[in-house]
Image (spheres, grey):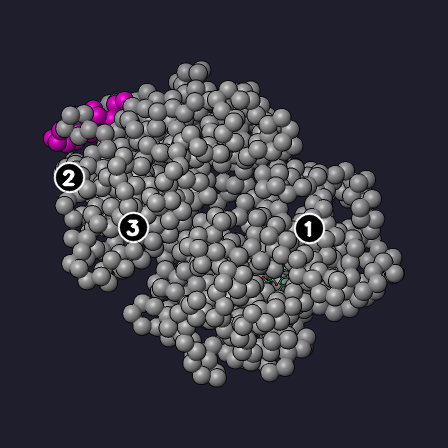
Amino acid sequence: PPRVVIIGAGIVGVNVADELIKRGWTNITVVEQGPLDMPGGSTSHAPGLVFQTTPSKTMSLFAKYTIEKLLSIVEDGQSCFNQVGGLEIATTPERLEELKRKRGFASSWGIDARVITPDECVKLYPHLNKQLLYGGLHIPTDGLALAARSVQILIERTRKSGTRYLGNTAVTGIKQTGGRVTGVETSNGVIEADIVIACAGLWSVEVGAMVGLSIPLQPMAHQYAKTTPVPASAGRNPLPNGANLPILRHQDQDLYYREHGDQYGIGFYGHRPMPVVAASLGPTAKKVTEHNMPSRLEFTPKDFEPAWKLSQEILPVLKESEIADGFNGIMSFTPDGGPLVGQAPNLDNFYVAEGVWVTHSGGVARALAQLLVNGKSEIDLTDCELSRFEDIQLTPSYVNETCSQQFVEVYDIIHPLQPKESPRNVRVTPFHARHKELGAVFLETGGWERPHWYESNAKLLDEMPAKFKPAERDPWAAKFYSPIVAAEAWRTRTAAAMFDTTAFRRLEIAGPGAVDLLDGLTTGNVSRKPGVATYSLLLDQEGGVRSEMTISRVLDDLFLLGVNGPTDFTFFSREARKQNKLGDGKFVQVRDITGGTCGIGLWGPNAHKILSAVSADDFSDSALPHLHLKLAHIAGLPAKVIRMSYVGQPGWEIVTSAENGLKLWDSLWKAGQAHGVIAGGRSALASMRLEAGFPSFGSDLTPEHDPYESGLEFLLHPGKEGYLGHAALQGRSKDAVSKRLRRLVINDGRSVVLGKEPVFHKGTAVGYVTSSGVGYEIGKPLAYTYLPISLGEGTVVEIEYFGRRISATVVPEPVHPMKSDEGRV
Ligand code: FAD
């Protein structure tokens, strides 16, 4: 097995060692700057609350596995998990609704949870002030991790299997040659390694810097205090650190609670963000105690004052106690709240597992071990990939600002479409000024400002035929939404619209090895003549859908790709590096050209008239058929015009370099006025995508499913062999799958769901909504979900939305828009 060095013996590092050993990798050294019995990182003081349910499937499954694992770590008849259950309380009507939504997530991810009344809350948790309660969410399988104890047991266990632990040994540098790590430099000499894994917790930024890697993580201080013994709790728990009441979350006031014997532990997120620079903490002492622990900063009582008052209100028994001691503990935050897992984009064989809570530690460690040993984690890592961030999101100021925001919002009710408040206006497209003139309402993704609809299109609402008029939405679904979206969809279907596609990531793959690279990695036939575009899948070696993309051959050795995100760029870059190392003349270069270029999707029945008015080139069906590209001149500007559509309407995506963008927009806009052109936003695009039958990557399409399950088998080029994932697909077929992506129509014609809600059949949860929206042309809400294959067309299922069950029927797929851009609903 390869020689592995793990940096950090916190709960993550030690679990990674354990999970690797389970999979037969035994040559492992764990290097820890602190003493092994108490290393001094966040794990050393973690109170260990494990609440499993989140909107993220990946995170919830990580938590589920962590619990399973902690329960299995047993010594002296005691496991490392105290399964007291979890109780989240609502003290506002909005929170009660949120808890109902959360119960839905729990069902989606297979976690047993129940929304309970104030009476039931008090029965479960007698210390609560019932007067303040609207209800609660009870999750019987949540509980308390004995984090530090589990680390000590795992150290012993992995030691017995040969793992070497070097305590009081700081990693001071990481050795690399030719784009690979070769070992670590420590305060006690060099350790050679084939693979280095950083599990450095709040020190991640410093360790990343050793290899020139920007780690988007911000350590933040977070207050935790213990009370003096609470008389009402006397005798409840025989052990000083024992607990039998459920762990408690009072999220309306940013508070959480656990018992420590007859004392209470109180955690508070309601104070000001207090970012910390790990490098300023100094070296870890040879002997760590509570008093010199680097991850424990001095308590700032003033910040805790509101917490104490609010705690006595919700738990009146605390009036009989005082704050005994407290600290400002340091924990890691990331810009989107997710952990950082996976291989460094810039370096082979350097991996990280950072920004991980105790709650997810076992799950993350198993995922990383599976990734290393098998090449793939069984739980989808898309949302955790270290390489998921845009360059702009890696700057220290961006990380600091967004992590501070994450800290503030950690317990807030967050709408799935809610954009961050700041930083905003970081990346704007060349059409930004025009969007503003048209009253665009912007949401933010990856730093980009993207119009979701245009207020100037409000006037269309009166012209729109009754058929397109959307039903009124419930208040939650009406957030970040406007009926104008329906008007934009209507005009796209009946006249034409210009969509700003600039933020869609574009790669250029160039060189004599470009065809070979793409041919070996993707499912489509990319070796056709220049001018042909292919809609293609990128699979992993197990046949899971890693991404989907358009690949246009521009010249013999130049391709333009429309891909999904930074991870695609990282993936192609890494594969190109490998190919270039072969030195066989098949050199290939991958460039991300998104920012230097821009795009407009011109779609709708009048699109042809508009384009012809500003160009002498021939864009007729015969001159430029579906899925073809032309190098053309539009309004005197050089542009790549690709005949393809995401919306089930004919038209083109027009790509030009950024400095030409404004003129391109203005020219099309002017020519379009005679033909009813409008500007269309992301929301209309998303709904038309769904209506046209175009599943999206990241929600409907994930590596958990192969092309047959995803309904995209038509993208496996017949007769093509040998591409990545091809071997794994042998023997599989559309008819042999156990699950399939299905399209649902909501039967009442009005209830809009927003995604991730559980889907029930005859009372049993059988799936969850992967994406949803309204089909304005068919006049009904739609959703995608993976369902057992037996639940085919015509099956009636129920979607749970805020505790309510909504009836939906499985309907046939429309013609996929990439099969034909005239493909209609
Ligand atoms: P750590 O435990 O910090 O381990 C990282 C290790 O790497 C350290 O031991 C460090 O010494 C070592 N290291 C770093 N750099 C080097 C180097 N250069 N050379 C050698 N060694 C190095 N999470 C929950 O799930 N539930 C909770 O209830 C909870 N409550 C919390 C309350 C507080 C007050 C705080 C601060 C955190 C809380 N957390 C909670 C978060 C949780 O404690 C952490 O997310 C988790 O412990 C991180 O584990 P880790 O292994 O990544 O990091």
Residue type beneath disc 2: Lys
Residue on which disc 1 sits: 142
Question: Is the residue marked 1 within 8 Å of ligand 1, measured from its CB?
Answer: no
Residue type beneath disc 3: Gly
Mark 1 vs mark 3: give the one in front. 1
Question: Is the residue marked 2 within 8 Å of ligand 1, measured from its CB?
Answer: no
| Circle 3: element type | loop
User: Which label is found at residue 286?
Assistant: none
Q: Residues within 10 Å of mark 3 (few under 14, many from 20)?
A: some
Residue on which disc 2 sits: 529
Q: On the rendered structure, is 603 left or right of 369?
A: left
Residue type beneath disc 1: Asp
Q: Earlier in the sequence, mark 2 or mark 3?
A: 2
On the image, the x and y values in percent for residue 577 come to 27, 60
Which quarter of the rendering shows the N terminus?
Answer: bottom left
Q: Residue 386, located in which quarter of the rendered image?
A: bottom left
Residue that extends furthest to the top in the rendered view of this protein: 466
Can residue 773 be seen by looking at this rendering? no
What is the span of residues highlighted in magenta in the rendered image? 604-619
**Which residue sits at x=52%, y=41%?**
416
Label 3 near label 1: C-beta < 8 Å?
A: no
Residue that extends furthest to the left in the rendered view of this protein: 616
Label 1 near label 2: C-beta < 8 Å?
A: no
Q: On the rendered structure, is 254 left or right of 816?
A: right
**Which residue sits at x=79%, y=55%?**
244
CA–CA distance in space, label 1 to label 3: 45 Å
| Circle 2: element type | loop
Whether 605 is among the magenta residues is yes
Residue on which disc 3 sits: 595
On the image, the x and y values in percent for residue 539 come to 36, 45
